[in-house]
Amino acid sequence: MIELSELLLLSAVLFVLGVVGFIIRRNILIMFMSVELMLNSAGLVLVAFSNKLGTMDPQVFAVFVIALAAAEAAVGLAIIVALFRGRESVNIDEMRLLKW
């Protein structure tokens, strides 16, 4: 059986990797995947606490986190594709002004 502390440590590592990826990288796709990684680490924490507490309430919030991540993926990828078609680049430094 996996302990709660191990799951929380794994979630913290995933969240930190997401934050570092978001801050360091200038590629908008990598930044987008880093945000997804942070959302998934939050979902992992909710499921870990649901298992520890023996209740399903945190898992309901985890489903909302998954729905939020799916909506963000749909809208975010559509925006990224539209920006790429206009600029032909996914470098965030070239998109600061968002002028076509």
Image (tube, rainbow, N blue to C red):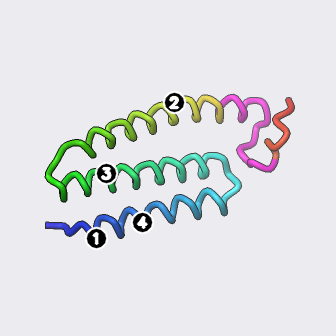
Vertical relation: 66 (above or below) 25: above
Q: CA distance from mark 1 to mark 4?
A: 10 Å
Q: Earlier in the sequence, mark 2 or mark 4?
A: 4
Q: Earlier in the sequence, mark 1 or mark 2?
A: 1
Q: Nearer the viewer, mark 1 or mark 3?
A: 3
Toward the viewer: 27 or 36? 36
The answer to whether marks 4 and 3 mark residues whose Cβ atoms lie closer than 8 Å is no
Dot 4: element: helix
Q: Nearer the viewer, mark 1 or mark 2?
A: 1
State the residue position of label 4: 12
Locate residue 58, reporting x and y percent. 27, 46
Vertical relation: 98 (above or below) 39: above
The answer to whether marks 1 and 4 mark residues whose Cβ atoms lie closer than 8 Å is no
Dot 1: element: helix
Tell me, for residue 46, which label it has, or none. 3
Q: Nearer the viewer, mark 2 or mark 3?
A: 3
Image quadrant occupied by the C terminus: top right
Span of residues in magenta: 81-93
Q: Earlier in the sequence, mark 2 or mark 3?
A: 3
Locate residue 16, reporting x and y percent. 50, 65
Locate residue 1, reporting x and y percent. 13, 67
Tell me, for residue 74, which label it has, or none. 2
Q: Earlier in the sequence, mark 4 or mark 3?
A: 4
| Amino acid at circle 2 | Ala
Tell me, for residue 6, which label it has, or none. 1
What residue lies at 26% left-to-right and 57% top-to-bottom?
48
Vertical relation: 86 (above or below) 28: above
Q: CA distance from mark 2 to mark 4?
A: 26 Å
Toward the viewer: 66 or 26? 66
